[in-house]
Image (cartoon, grey):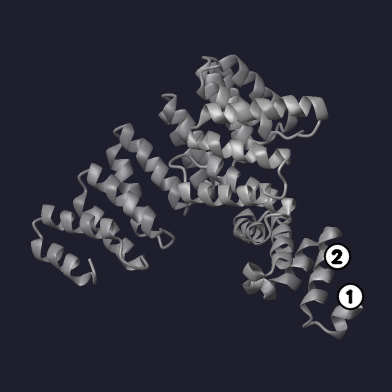
Amino acid sequence: KKAYEIDPENKDGVLHLAQAHYQLGQYQQAFQLLEPLMGYFEKDHALAKLLGQVLLAMNEKLLAEPILTSAAEQKPADVESVLLATDLILTRIESIPGDIPQEDLDKLESILQNSILTNQAHPQIRLHLADIDRIRGDYQKALDMYLKLSEESQLEKTLPHWRLPYGLGQTALKLGNHEVGVAALQDAASKQPENLLILHALAEAYQIIDLPRKAHETAIASLRLAPQEIDNILWYADFKTKNNEPKEAVRALKEALQINSERVELKLWLCKILISMDSVQEARDILADLITNAQAKPQELHQAAYMCVHLNELDLAVSALEKSRQLSQGTDPTLIMDLAVLYSLLDQWKKGLNVLNLEEGF
């Protein structure tokens, strides 16, 4: 601390002092020291690693992920950075229903492959490569590695990690071995009983083997663990909708919106379910409100426009796309074409042509 007071501009001194605060659990003090250096983390492994660890300790996972990913890319031999970044990326990918971001998986696979060059026998890196195979749908390849790691772990006690039974359970279920799948997920839950990812998988597994009461109890348990976490609420709504309980999904989303009234992603999911229930007017009113929401992002407005078209609310759809176009950085050809088509459907041909002509390079 005295060295820092003498020369507060010395980066090594700042890092050493921040490291000391971090090790003492004084995360806010550590971050205050590191924050002025945030612009340099992409070229400084030590800074990226410590800054990422501090942010992770502060539960700032979205901020920590790209920084720890940079640390892992800069120095693949540093297993600690690689594993921290990997866990954040995999958890984010598996927590959100919908399409898998292939680009993120490709980047993660590259990091792990580079790391395994210097850590060839490291069980956790091999485990995460199997996780990537599973997420991509290469279930047999993933299963073979999970079983190999499980056998090694029993012999040497090298991998007491929840992701092994979790991955094994998920893969076994996909391959139709329900008994092994459920047992493995129950094992994972015994290791981390408050892990939402495991609870979600276990609830879905119980539904697959026709144990609806256990599925419901597990789903409710996950919702109660994190009633304000957006991804958790969206998973619950998706789970209930898939299991023909849309009213329960609507109830959960409306309760969440009472706490997070401006969260656009919650409103989009609510509209999607209301439309499936033929609650057309309620869905239309929510979409109209969403389009005027200052927090709505271009992609969310584009999704809202598609829902408006489904409801035959073409004027509302145009409003959503026009706002999306204003907020977008650069040209989105799909958005421009959708907007031009909507103007043509409304017999506003001149506006449609103007949209096409005004976009340079389109």
Q: Are marks 1 and 2 in contact (CB under 8 Å)?
A: yes
Residue 221 in view: no
Residue at 65%, 69% (x, y): give it.
41
Element under label 1?
A: loop
What is the crowding at mark 2: few (fewer than 14 residues within 10 Å), some, or many (at least 20)?
Answer: some
Query: Image check: 109 left or right of 266?
Result: right
352 to 273, vertically: above or below: below
What is the crowding at mark 1: few (fewer than 14 residues within 10 Å), some, or many (at least 20)?
Answer: few
318 to 123, vertically: above or below: below
Residue 199 in view: yes
Residue flagged by tag 2: what amino acid is it?
Ala
Numbered tag placed on residue 1 in the rendering: 1
Element under label 2?
A: helix
285 to 200, vertically: above or below: below
Q: Position of residue 304 (x, y in %)?
A: 33, 50
Residue flagged by tag 1: what amino acid is it?
Lys
Q: Position of residue 18 (x, y in %)?
A: 80, 68
Q: Position of residue 269 (x, y in %)?
A: 41, 42
In front: 273, or 259? Answer: 273
| Marked residue nearer the N-terminal end (1 or 2) | 1
Q: CA distance from mark 1 to mark 2?
A: 9 Å
Mark 2 = which residue? 20
Residue at 24%, 69% (x, y): give it.
361
Residue at 61%, 47% (x, y): give it.
113
In front: 199, or 81? Answer: 81
Quadrant of residue 126 in the image? top right
In front: 172, or 126? Answer: 126
